[in-house]
Image (cartoon, grey):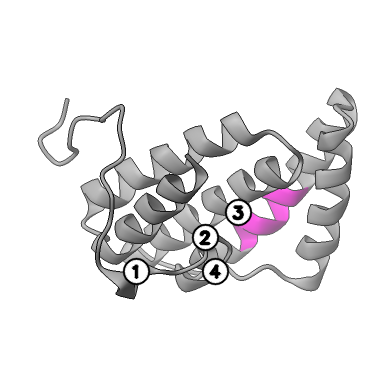
Amino acid sequence: MSEAFPERSSTVQPETDSTHEVAIEKIPELLGFVETEELRRTRSFLVDVMSRCDGEAIGELGTYYRELAVRIVENFQGEEYAKAQMGLSLTMSLIRRDAGRVEEYLEDVEDALYYATGMGFDDIAAALRQALNEAL
């Protein structure tokens, strides 16, 4: 394992700094990923389809959503690109959560926490840690 990334822990450590009390729904926007109106509409359809487990439609809508979202992320460079990409990934995890796929959502948030910690995005890592603690 690379020294830049810490070992994954099976437990989440509590965060005591109240300045990190940011709702997880707000984190993607803080990272620079802001959904367009078309993305919001597509997201709504995607959540509905995922909650009904319609595999073919999930694939089509998921691909369409990601293609639109990547256009936003591609407007960034360097560290801002990395943050916007993380914002997109968190948004996808929120879609899973809203569709009732909570276990997948938690795994995604844990992955994002690992990445944020490794990249030195300490405020984001603290907010993700808080979100995991609240969900457990």
Residue 91 is labelled as 3
Nearer the viewer's eye, disc 2 or disc 3? 2
| Figure check: 104 above or below 92 | above
Q: Considering only order in the chain, which callout, 1 or 4, is on the residue closer to the N terminus?
A: 1
| Distance of label 2 from label 4 (alpha carbons) | 5 Å
Figure check: 28 above or below 128: below
First reached walking from the N terminus: tag 3 or tag 4: 4
Which residues are drawn in magenta?
Answer: 65-71
Q: Are marks 1 and 3 in contact (CB under 8 Å)?
A: no
Q: Secondary structure at mark 1?
A: helix
Give me the C-alpha separation between circle 1 and circle 3. 19 Å
Label for residue 24? 2
| Whether label 3 touches label 4, CB < 8 Å | no
Residue 14 covered by magenta stretch: no
Q: Which residue is mark 1?
A: 20
Report the Cα–Cα distance between label 2 and label 3: 9 Å
Instruction: Say which residue label 4 marks.
Output: 26
Q: CA distance from mark 1 to mark 2?
A: 10 Å
Q: Is residue 3 visible?
A: yes
Identify which residue is drawn at 83% across, 36% down: 51
Residues under numbered marks 2 and 4 in contact, where contact means CB atoms less than 8 Å apart: yes
The residue lying at 31 percent from left, 64 percent from top is: 79
Q: Tag 1: residue type?
A: His
